[in-house]
Amino acid sequence: MEYWLWISIGLFLLGIEMFTPTGMYLLIIGLACICVGGLVSLGLASTLTMQCFLAAALTLLFIFTIRKPFHAILKGMTKRTASDITSQTVTITEAIAPGAIGKGELSGTNWTVQNNSAAVLEAGSRHRVASVHGLTLIVH
């Protein structure tokens, strides 16, 4: 097959990936096709059998090496740690007495909040997260 046909197929698959939830598999196959097109243009894969073998091998290689990191980056599913939450601002959703535990909202998620200050935290007030203990946000 001609190199431009491999690249066209790859670009077509990348386009389909943009509009369908395929779990990044069409993106991976499309990248493999584009790579094979590049190899064919350099004269490194002359027979159709060799080209198909390379496309299959590159697809498998990409699935096992780059699919998961691509998926995490493109879908925004990076894991957050306690240090990512520390110093952010939590909105208190119910009054919390000193030393007591109540509820708050941070980044659209409801959290358990512990008041480690000497004052009452009023509903609607905003406070910085000092630390995280398990699933409890500690504010001062």
Image (tube, helix red, strand yellow):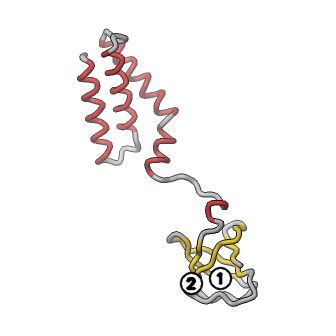
Labelled pair 1, 2 in contact (Cβ < 8 Å): yes
Q: Which residue is drawn at 39% across and 17% down?
A: 53
Camera-side residue: 72 or 121? 121
Q: Distance between the residues labelled 1 and 2?
A: 8 Å
Q: Residue at x 24, y 17 (%)?
A: 2
Tell me the number on the disc at residue 93: 2
Q: What is the three-letter code of the residue carrying label 1?
A: Gly
Secondary structure beneath disc 2? loop
Q: Residue at x 47, y 38 (%)?
A: 67
Secondary structure beneath disc 1? strand
Res 43 → quadrant: top left
Res 30 → quadrant: top left
What residue does disc 1 label? 102
Residue 96 in percent (x, y) is at: 66, 87
Q: In this view, does 65 lie above or below 119?
A: above
Q: What is the three-letter code of the residue carrying label 2?
A: Thr
Q: Which residue is drawn at 71% across and 89% down?
A: 119
